[in-house]
């Protein structure tokens, strides 16, 4: 329907309903909800992940993830009963008789965090341990290897912490050990222990960052052992087992320094130890931890660590297990991000656990519950989605793959919030253009080298460059020929302590705002301070005078139309560097592209160009050049521009910006267009377009086609450089600022049409006009007629498509010359050239044909303006040569005769 229809209910109150349309089919009423145009900022705070729908993106059939602005209505509320289990088995209970075995390298992963920490070649073993006082005196914490291995590495308590390396190739029992001296590791508290083995054979034991023992020990080989065991010996017959707890195990083929171990201990790969003096158990403390106990290790199916769990202790705190790393050495990964569900309501575990160690109680399933929406396809902010799930006693689902059983809101096909953070970076190319990079997204078009780049306004024109190590800060790294950088988005209030002028506001404020008068909260400030500066109005909540980020200014943009500007700015800053750029606006959402937004963006680009301050003088100058003179004066252009902006001129026009009736009236009725005296000004007038000169000749001389023939001008684009509907570009056949060489160059006078005056075009023009006058419209004698028709050039006039049929009223040459001058040059033909035309007409055998040929070759016919010279130009005396050697280029044009 063409009109909006009134409706009732919640569906008419939601913010993103632009129009409600009603149509009936089989007694069914359909409501269509159209999202309004939305101008976003390309970069935003605290990005969050969204699930893009099942099979929506061809790159990842079955679902994908994208970053989105959590404050925008980008996705829906998809709720689950239990999602992400608090994410990791961060604490492992080693009960008597139940040792935990890791058999084979599939239980280990390679990660880069150890390499990021640094360290020399060697080996480092580190972990948080909770040693029970009831444990044995010879408990084994870690055992790398077997009795058949070349060597065997054991970290254990032998009355005190001991690091021992066995050499299987040596006599039985041969080993070297490093045992910690002094006070033992305390019991029933969490302690960070580490063993560092350098490449030179020096080994060290470090407890809570303090060096407790050092000595020479055989360096174990870097090759992975055949078995890796936590909390027990490699030998099943060995009764020693660790009765305490362990977390954040770290194994690396690098020997870390004390400083690096401190970094590891204080946050790089470990969170602070759990509080409390007793061994914590895993309990259900909130909806994020709806289970009583988790005592299970997690493994990934390949060599890339992806997901683990987290645990909650009795205090109710969820201890996230930071991403443990193993560098380039096979080691144990006990890190954590989020657990991912495989299929909702499947009835089995959603997690890929170690199938070789089926210990602990079975995991509860993560059951999908409900989609929360007020209408199908509703998009809400992240906060709204979380609140809706919480109100239903649920939480946002944390999985992206698989379809939900209940699709009542349509979130299988469109976006749903995952409730997980997403990191946004910027890829800076070598030309300063940038691209958005969503680190946590698996959609290639949002990754590095995606090809989606755009220009931004860098502060001071400076940006990170690869050859300068991207500025040398920690926020960027070299990526190809450009840089990949972390960013921080900041917002600030622009005017705080004084009222700006209209010009200051227009230049400094680059973010638009809705019309404040469309809301009940805003009112115009009418105090003396707010109204002191002309041309600017101030709006604020309640009409307050104080300038805040909520203040909105109204100014006339570029003198064209009123706009509303927000009193704030958004800046994207490159981390740890001085580089920054204005946060650019963005119509097209990367996560949710739509043809609707492309149409909006195109409309606003055209609107932006149309209201640019240079449009009025640009249009005015071009119209004046086409209709009056090639060099309009500044006053003339200003008068035309004023008519374009105001939409009126001497009562002509409808008063709207860009009204062409008013604009053309100003072009033709201004005194510069109507003053005949200006014909004597050498800078006034211009060269006629060759096509217009030809049509002037044919119309004035009453061209009449033969019966049944159309007026067909063939090949004018190649002959004259200009033909109807055949402009080579959108910028016309010539440039408006073209200045020909010669006298015009010295005078800096524009002659756009003279750009077509090349030697080939001039010769074709002379030949074609002569053929038209003598023969009529034909292709014979290089004429402008069609060459596809049968011609007899021996009788060119007899086979022509038509002829010039005008006959003069007078019979004497002088009178005929006056008539032709009026029709073809608006009376500007000089007396000297009139005499030449008259002489040609009166000459024996002459007549109208000879007179026309002379006149059409006169400068008054091919230009607009008088021809002031009354005598030939004085001959220029040749200058004397300098006597030096020079190189000359001689151009000989042979086309069209000698």
Image (cartoon, rainbow, N blue to C red):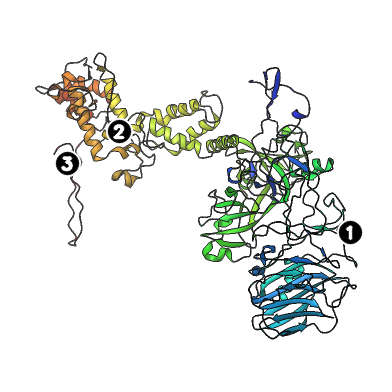
Q: Position of residue 501 (x, y in %)?
A: 65, 44
**CA distance separating discs 3 and 2:** 20 Å
Instruction: Specify whether 480 is left or right of 770.
Output: right
| Residue farthest along the left direction in this orientation | 844
Question: Left or right: 157 with respect to 475?
Answer: right
- In the figure, 651 relative to 416: above or below? above
For label 1, the residue is 314
Residue 827 showing in the rendered view: no
Q: Which picture quadrant has residue 244?
A: bottom right
Q: Residues within 10 Å of mark 3 (few under 14, many from 20)?
A: few
Q: Residue at the spot x=66%, y=34% of the render?
A: 36
| Residue at (71% x, 21% y) in the render | 29
Name the N-terminal-most of marks 3 and 2.
Answer: 2
Vertical arrangement, residue 336 with respect to residue 231, above or below = above
Tag 3, which secondary structure?
Answer: loop
Residue on which disc 3 sits:
894
Rendered location of residue 558, percent (x, y): 57, 39
Label of residue 385 in the image: none
| 3 and 2 marks in contact (CB < 8 Å) | no
* Residue contact at pointers 2 and 1, CB within 8 angstroms: no
Q: Quadrant of residue 128?
A: bottom right
| Tag 2 residue | 717
């Amino acid at each position: 329907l063409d009109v909006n229809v009134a409706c009732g209910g919640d569906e008419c109150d939601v913010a993103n309903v632009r129009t409600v349309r009603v149509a009936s089919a089989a007694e069914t009423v359909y409501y269509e909800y159209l999202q309004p145009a939305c101008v976003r900022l390309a970069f935003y705070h605290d990005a969050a992940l969204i699930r893009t729908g099942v099979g929506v993106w061809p790159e990842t059939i079955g679902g994908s993830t994208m970053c989105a602005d959590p404050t925008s209505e980008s996705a829906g509320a998809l709720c689950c009963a239990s999602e992400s289990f608090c994410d990791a088995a961060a604490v492992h209970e080693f009960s008597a008789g139940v040792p935990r075995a890791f058999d084979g390298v599939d239980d280990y992963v390679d990660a880069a965090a150890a390499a990021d920490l640094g360290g020399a070649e060697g080996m480092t073993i580190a972990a948080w341990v909770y040693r029970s006082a009831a444990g044995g005196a010879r408990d084994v914490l870690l055992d790398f290897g077997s009795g058949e291995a070349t060597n065997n590495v054991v970290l254990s308590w032998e009355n005190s912490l001991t690091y021992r390396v066995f050499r299987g190739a040596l006599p039985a029992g041969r080993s070297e050990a490093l045992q910690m001296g002094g006070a033992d590791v305390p019991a029933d508290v969490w302690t960070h222990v580490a063993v560092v083995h350098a490449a030179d054979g020096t080994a060290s034991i470090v407890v809570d960052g303090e060096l407790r023992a050092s000595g020479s020990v055989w360096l174990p080989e870097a090759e992975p052992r055949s078995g890796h065991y936590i909390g027990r010996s490699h030998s099943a017959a060995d009764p020693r087992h660790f009765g305490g707890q362990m977390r954040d195990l770290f194994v690396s083929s690098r020997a870390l320094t004390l400083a690096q171990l401190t970094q590891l201990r204080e946050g790089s790969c470990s969170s602070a130890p759990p509080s409390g003096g007793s061994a914590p158990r895993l309990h259900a403390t909130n909806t994020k931890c709806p289970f009583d106990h988790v005592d299970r290790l997690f493994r990934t199916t390949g060599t890339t660590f992806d997901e683990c769990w987290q645990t909650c202790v009795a205090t109710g705190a969820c201890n996230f297990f930071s991403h443990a790393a193993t560098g380039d050495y096979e080691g144990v990964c006990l890190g954590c991000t989020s657990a991912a569900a495989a299929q909702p309501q499947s009835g089995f575990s959603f997690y890929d656990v170690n199938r070789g160690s089926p210990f602990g109680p079975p995991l509860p399933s993560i059951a999908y519950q409900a989609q929360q929406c007020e209408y199908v396809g509703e998009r809400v902010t992240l906060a709204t989605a979380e609140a809706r799930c919480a109100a239903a006693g649920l939480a946002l689902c944390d999985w992206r793959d698989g379809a939900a059983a209940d699709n009542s809101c349509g979130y299988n096909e469109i976006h749903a919030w995952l409730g997980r953070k997403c990191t946004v970076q910027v890829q800076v190319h070598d030309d300063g253009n940038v691209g958005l990079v969503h680190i946590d997204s698996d959609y290639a078009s949002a990754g590095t080298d995606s090809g989606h780049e755009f220009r931004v306004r860098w502060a001071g024109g400076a940006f990170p460059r690869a050859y300068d190590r991207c500025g040398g800060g920690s926020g960027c790294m070299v990526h190809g020929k450009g840089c990949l950088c972390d960013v921080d988005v900041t917002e600030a209030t622009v005017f705080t302590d004084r009222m700006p002028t209209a010009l200051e506001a227009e230049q400094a404020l680059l973010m638009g705002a809705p019309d404040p008068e469309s809301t009940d909260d805003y009112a115009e400030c009418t105090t003396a301070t707010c109204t002191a500066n002309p041309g600017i109005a101030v709006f604020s909540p309640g009409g307050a005078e104080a300038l805040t980020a909520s203040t909105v200014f109204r100014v006339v943009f570029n003198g064209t139309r009123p706009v509303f500007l927000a009193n704030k700015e958004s800046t994207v800053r490159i981390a740890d560097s001085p580089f920054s750029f204005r946060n650019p606006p963005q119509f097209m959402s990367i996560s949710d592209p739509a043809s609707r937004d492309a149409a909006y963006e195109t409309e606003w680009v055209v609107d932006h160009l149309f209201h640019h301050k240079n449009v009025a003088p640009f249009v005015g100058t071009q119209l004046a050049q086409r209709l009056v003179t090639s060099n309009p004066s500044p006053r003339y252009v200003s008068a035309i521009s004023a008519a374009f902006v105001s939409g009126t001129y001497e009562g002509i026009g409808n008063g709207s910006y860009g009204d062409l009736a008013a604009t053309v009236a100003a072009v033709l009725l201004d005194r510069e267009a109507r003053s005949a005296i200006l014909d004597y000004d050498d800078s006034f007038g211009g060269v006629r377009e060759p096509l217009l000169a030809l049509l002037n000749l044919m119309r004035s001389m009453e061209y009449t086609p033969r019966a049944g023939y159309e007026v067909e001008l063939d090949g004018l684009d190649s002959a004259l450089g200009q033909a109807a509907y055949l402009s080579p570009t959108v910028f016309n056949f010539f440039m408006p600022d073209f200045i020909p060489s010669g006298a015009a160059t010295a005078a800096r006078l524009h002659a756009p049409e003279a750009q077509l005056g090349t030697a080939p075009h001039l010769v074709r023009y002379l030949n074609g006009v002569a053929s038209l006058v003598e023969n009529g419209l034909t292709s014979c004698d290089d004429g402008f007629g069609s060459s596809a028709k049968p011609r007899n050039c021996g009788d060119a006039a007899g086979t022509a498509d038509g002829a010039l049929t005008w006959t003069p009223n007078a019979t004497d040459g002088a009178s005929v010359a006056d008539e032709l001058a009026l029709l073809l040059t608006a009376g500007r033909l000089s007396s000297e050239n009139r005499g030449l035309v008259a002489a040609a007409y009166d000459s024996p055998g002459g007549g109208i044909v000879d007179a026309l040929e002379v006149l059409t070759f006169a400068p008054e016919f091919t230009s607009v303006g008088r021809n002031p010279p009354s005598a030939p130009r004085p001959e220029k005396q040749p200058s004397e040569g300098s006597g030096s050697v020079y190189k000359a280029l001689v151009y000989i044009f042979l086309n069209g005769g000698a």
